[in-house]
Image (cartoon, grey):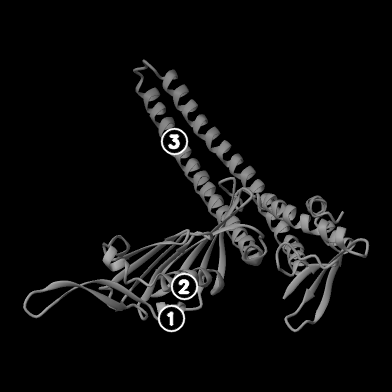
């Protein structure tokens, strides 16, 4: 697919921007009411917690004041009846105060648990609703992938950042177990072995690692790749580290690339091909991606009710494309792109500013702010 503006200028990113814009608006319509409900719940619970904490403090202070007063009034008295009365009052005060404090503290803990449970449920709903947007709709984010075998299956973590916002996703891949052959093809790597009938000498041995199982793939989204693989028994382990098209190859603790003799037996083109295919695999063969956390300026955006601030950052990015589409379009107030399929078929997709604005306006002041940032107001 080829995506262009209406005047045939290519979009800065080859994506169906109209679909992404519609998805963004639909997602905003779901998550902003959720975040507002989280804010309301937090405020209500905060008021109730503050009220209970004040009652606990008042009860504790009252009990101490009574005990101090009775103690002072009976101080120095040798009258048995007065001392008995003092002790009875003190015991009753302590018992009643402790019982009251216990009940209030139990209620406080219950409210805190219920509050945490309610807020946690909303947070999970927020992350679930945001997941499709963060899976494919955040343009230009810097992504790093950390993939390894866990519980017998290949799993990964994506860490990405964009304009002060960071997010983390759990990943699963198309293969639970992946071999070098499946990601690349045949590969042989050299190592030393002892050979000879009468006297053992070191000789170069080429090991077929094609069916070795990949145990880790770390890719920083740019030039750095760190790949680990081993045979089925885990006895033979190799590691390839690549930076800016330079390669370090390890067999266990042995640095193959630091040994000139072994290095001459390395087919660099094959190693480069494997590294390149690993980059493609970690990006393109993701089976599922689940959003786990969003940070804004290093703090949990969902827990701190700052999802709207995150949406504004994304809207700024979308707004640049909206304005360029309007500038390059032929119909006033229509955000339009052209799509050319591989067979040459061409279609147009559009959304009017009015349509986008009306949907966002349903959200009140927050929706109107997003509309302004998007440039559809």
Q: Residue at x 39, y 17 (%)?
A: 75
Instruction: Report the Cα–Cα distance between label 2 and label 3.
Output: 83 Å
> Which numbered marker is on residue 185?
1
Q: Earlier in the sequence, mark 3 or mark 1?
A: 3
Label 2 sits on residue: 273
SS under mark 3: helix
Residue beneath the point at 56% across and 54% down: 116
Contact between marks 1 and 2 (CB within 8 A): the answer is yes
Q: Is residue 101 above or below residue 322?
A: above
Could you classify mark 1 by the number of other residues whose Cα lies within 10 Å: few (under 14), some (14-19), or many (20 or more)?
some
Image disc number at residue 286: none
Q: Position of residue 14 (x, y in %)?
A: 71, 68
How far apart are the two marked residues, 1 and 2, measured between alpha carbons?
A: 9 Å
x%, y% of residue 139? 67, 60
Q: Decide which of 91, 191 is in the foreground and name it.
A: 191
Does 85 appear above or below 360?
A: above
Q: Secondary structure at mark 1?
A: loop
């Amino acid at each position: 697919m080829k995506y262009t503006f209406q005047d045939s200028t290519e979009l800065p990113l080859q994506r169906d921007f109209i679909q992404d814009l519609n998805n963004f608006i639909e997602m905003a319509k779901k998550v902003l009411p959720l975040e507002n409900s989280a804010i309301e719940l937090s405020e209500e619970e905060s008021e109730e917690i503050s009220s209970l904490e004040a009652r606990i403090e008042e009860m504790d202070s009252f009990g101490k004041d009574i005990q101090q007063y009775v103690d002072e009034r009976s101080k120095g008295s040798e009258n048995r009846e007065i001392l008995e009365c003092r002790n009875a009052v003190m015991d009753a005060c302590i018992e009643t105060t402790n019982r009251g404090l216990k009940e209030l503290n139990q209620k406080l803990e219950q409210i805190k648990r219920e509050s945490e449970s309610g807020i946690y449920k909303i947070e999970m709903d927020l992350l679930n609703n945001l997941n499709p947007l963060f899976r494919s709709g955040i343009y230009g984010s810097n992504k790093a992938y950390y993939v390894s075998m866990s519980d017998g299956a290949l799993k990964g973590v994506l860490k990405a950042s964009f304009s002060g916002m960071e997010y983390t996703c759990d990943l699963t891949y198309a293969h639970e177990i992946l071999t070098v052959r499946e990601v690349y093809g045949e590969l042989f790597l050299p190592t030393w072995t002892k050979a000879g009938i009468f006297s053992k000498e070191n000789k170069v041995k080429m090991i077929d690692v094609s069916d070795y199982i990949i145990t880790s793939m770390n890719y920083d989204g740019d030039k750095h790749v760190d790949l680990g693989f081993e045979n089925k028994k885990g006895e033979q382990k190799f590691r390839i580290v690549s930076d800016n098209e330079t390669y370090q190859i390890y067999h266990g603790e042995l640095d193959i690339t630091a040994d000139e003799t072994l290095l001459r037996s390395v087919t660099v083109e094959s190693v480069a091909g494997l590294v390149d295919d690993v980059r493609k695999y970690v990006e393109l063969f993701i089976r599922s991606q689940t959003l786990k956390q969003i940070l804004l300026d290093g703090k949990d955006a969902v827990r701190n009710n700052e999802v709207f601030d995150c949406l504004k950052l994304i809207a700024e990015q979308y707004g640049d494309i909206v304005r360029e589409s309007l500038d390059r379009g032929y119909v006033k107030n229509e955000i339009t792109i052209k799509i050319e399929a591989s067979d040459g078929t061409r279609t147009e997709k559009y959304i009017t500013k009015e349509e986008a604005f009306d949907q966002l306006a349903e959200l009140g002041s927050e929706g109107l702010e997003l509309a302004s940032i998007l440039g559809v107001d």
